[in-house]
Image (tube, rainbow, N blue to C red):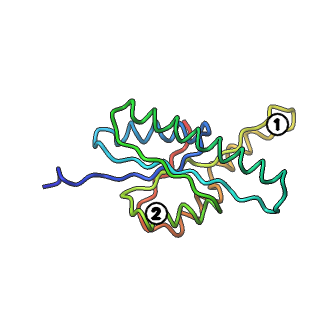
């Protein structure tokens, strides 16, 4: 009866270290279920229309597209099905909209974290930042946690 049900997992993916770790954890947790995976990235629109901002946006878009292709290749190496989706706009709203339209069984996001730059002040405050990071969520994750209608899995970096 349940053999015919195929799990669909939407993964917010930007190619960052945390996103890669969340992807690996997702495969570890759910790979045996042979889910269909959808990697989604969102390129943020520039706040002001200028040639410089357009160039930065295009660079971000190209980097996200490359990250999605690399993530897809990694998934397909595991013999799983994967599609990619890149959108433009506010990541919070675009991920929410995608979750409503695609109706995944699960939405996966990596927990936001700040990496200190290694300077003296950053090293002195790193303990405080780490503790604060454990108590708070990034703006995208926090937004989704309050509004998303499907199960949301927030994966911390190990």
| Front residue of this view, candidates 151 and 53 | 53
| Residue 153 x/y as whole percent | 46, 53
Q: Residue at x 87, y 32 (%)?
A: 120
What residue sits right under mark 2 in the picture?
99
| Residue 144 x/y as whole percent | 54, 63
Seen in the image, is 39 located left or right of residue 78?
right
The quarter in which the N terminus is drawn is bottom left
SS for callout 2: helix
SS for callout 1: helix
| Residue 151 x/y as whole percent | 41, 60
Going from the N terminus, do you reach mark 1 or mark 2 first? 2
| Front residue of this view, candidates 38 and 127 | 38
Residue located farthest toward the right when viewing the structure as drawn: 120
Residue located farthest toward the left when viewing the structure as drawn: 1
Q: Residues within 10 Å of mark 1 (few under 14, many from 20)?
A: few
For residue 60, the mark is none
Seen in the image, is 158 located left or right of residue 88?
left
Seen in the image, is 158 located left or right of residue 131?
left
What residue sits right under mark 1 in the picture?
124
Q: Nearer the viewer, mark 1 or mark 2?
A: 2
């Amino acid at each position: 009866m349940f053999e015919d049900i195929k799990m669909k997992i939407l993964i917010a993916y930007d190619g960052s270290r945390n996103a890669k770790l969340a992807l690996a954890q997702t495969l570890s947790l759910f790979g045996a279920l042979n889910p269909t995976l959808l990697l989604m990235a969102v390129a943020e629109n520039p706040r002001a229309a200028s040639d410089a901002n357009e160039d930065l946006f295009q660079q971000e878009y190209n980097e996200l597209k490359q990250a999605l292709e690399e993530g897809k290749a990694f998934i397909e190496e595991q013999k799983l099905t994967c599609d990619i989706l890149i959108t433009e706009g506010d990541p919070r709203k675009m991920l929410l909209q995608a979750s409503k339209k695609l109706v995944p069984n699960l939405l996966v996001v990596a927990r936001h974290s700040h990496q200190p730059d290694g300077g003296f002040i950053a090293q002195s405050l790193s303990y405080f930042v780490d503790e604060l990071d454990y108590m708070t969520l990034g703006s995208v994750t926090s937004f989704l946690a309050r509004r998303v209608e499907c199960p949301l899995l927030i994966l911390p970096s190990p």
